[in-house]
Amino acid sequence: MSINEAMVQDVVKEVMAKLQLASGASEGLGAFADMTDAIAAAKKAQGYIHRMSMDQREQIISVIRRKTKENAEILARMGVEETGMGNVPHKILKHQLVAEKTPGTEDITTTAWSGDKGLTLVEMGPFGVIGAITPCTNPSETIICNTIGMLAGGNTAVFNPHPAAIRTSLYAINMLNEASLEAGGPENIACAVRKPTLDSSNIMMKHPDIQLIAATGGPGVVTAVLSSGRRGIGAGAGNPPALVDETADIRKAAEDIVNGCTFDNNLPCIAEKEIVAVDCVVSELLHYMVSEQGCYLASKEEQDRLTSTVLTPKGLNRKCVGRDAKTLLGMIGVSVPDNIRCIIFEGEKEHPLIAEELMMPILGVVRAKDFDDAVEKAVWLEHGNRHSAHIHSKHIDNITRYAKAVDTAILVKNAPSYAALGFGGEGFCTFTIASRTGEGLTSASTFTKRRRCVMSESLCIR
């Protein structure tokens, strides 16, 4: 079989371009120096996307899915290297999950009524250019997930990524535009500024061509979006409690909780941040967590050292967020084997390592005298974020009471937290969970307007 020299050169060029972009030498497609220019480019691209058929949009999304899988390891390594948070194997899984389980055009549906008075349709139409603010915890995952959904609805996107993950974000945006061009679509379906700042964010939120803003981040970011005068989709903070009652399979609960808590070093906002367990199961739960699940039981002195290390007067120590348990323990002078993956301890619900959302594999266990007390403490710990909560129980009435009391966008029963994103559970994937504004797990339909079309006394053929 002869070697096609032209094909070899094309492959070499593609590999070199990827390596150059990954090293930060080039920002690629969709990257602009000025936010106004980024919005203008996305608006021009949206004019093309709006005229494309649903099949043509889906063709672009299919290429995005393929390219996301092909680039999963590159994006995972870039994310860990740039931010210092999370771990590569789990980030690869997250990119694969985004590629396979983020809804596309199938989520854009039509509702119809027909009768003696005619035919009425309600269809989902685009907003146009959607502004998006993305976090450093799941930078490329959020950008890819949002773009698939926004594009399926006929929109384009302008991102103001977190500055701490700008290289990874721009790589993902370049990949998305490459996918569009490969499928016959326009470039600039996703755009961003090369140097995102608060000023560029403010320009985006106040620009007349931005009618919808999707914010994935902390409470400050969401508050700013909801104060912008634009319609906002707010995916804010959470502090998800995992409740364990006396009917649970305690061994399985220990495994599920630790698996969920340690996934990507606890960066997902849905991950278990603390445990509330009824008194009679605490000892057994701690036993399985230590003996079988690689947990390290911290002493009171070690808890105090952890507290002063991971929390500062200004909030979380950024150098601790998304770090693994061994690294965190090493920061306080404790040496442990490589198989230690989670730090646990018992404490009151007010303990700073329990009450604060840490985004690191530290799990405080709060003891409750009975189920009612456990619910009360778990609801307090969730802090009214209405984001995520988890329960391990075989008692249907207990599960129901907890679900009503905690009132979160996500409630996972008898499984690791990541089951909520379709990983080991049913349902679709998203990395923008709009707990604050009530949309819940966002998908393509979330990023559309509802439009009613009425044909009176016609087109009814019954």
Image: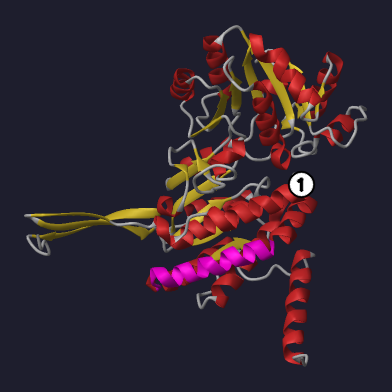
Residue 200 lies, in percent from the top left, at 59, 55
- Camera-nearest residue between 395 and 313: 395
- Quarter of the picture containing the N terminus is bottom right
- Residue, disc 1: 87
Residue 331 appears left or right of 98 = right
Residue 132 appears left or right of 400 = right
Which stretch is magenta? 52-71
- Quarter of the picture containing the C terminus is bottom left
The residue shown at (41%, 55%) is 107
Residue 106 lies, in percent from the top left, at 41, 59
Question: Is there any visible trace of residue 160 in the rendered image?
Answer: no
Which secondary structure is most common in the magenta stretch? helix
Mark 1 neighbour density, 10 Å: few (under 14) some (14–19) many (20 or more): many
* Residue 18 location, quadrant: bottom right
Number of disc labels: 1
Q: How is the image coloured?
A: secondary structure
Above or below — where is 268 with respect to 254?
Answer: below
Q: Amino acid at mark 1?
A: Asn
Question: Is there any visible trace of residue 115 in the rendered image?
Answer: yes
Residue 5 appears left or right of 177 = right
Residue 367 lies, in percent from the top left, at 66, 12
Above or below — where is 376 with respect to 438?
Answer: above
Q: Is residue 331 magenta?
A: no
Residue 32 appears left or right of 394 = right
The residue shown at (89%, 27%) is 332
Q: Is residue 61 magenta?
A: yes
- Camera-nearest residue between 204 and 134: 134
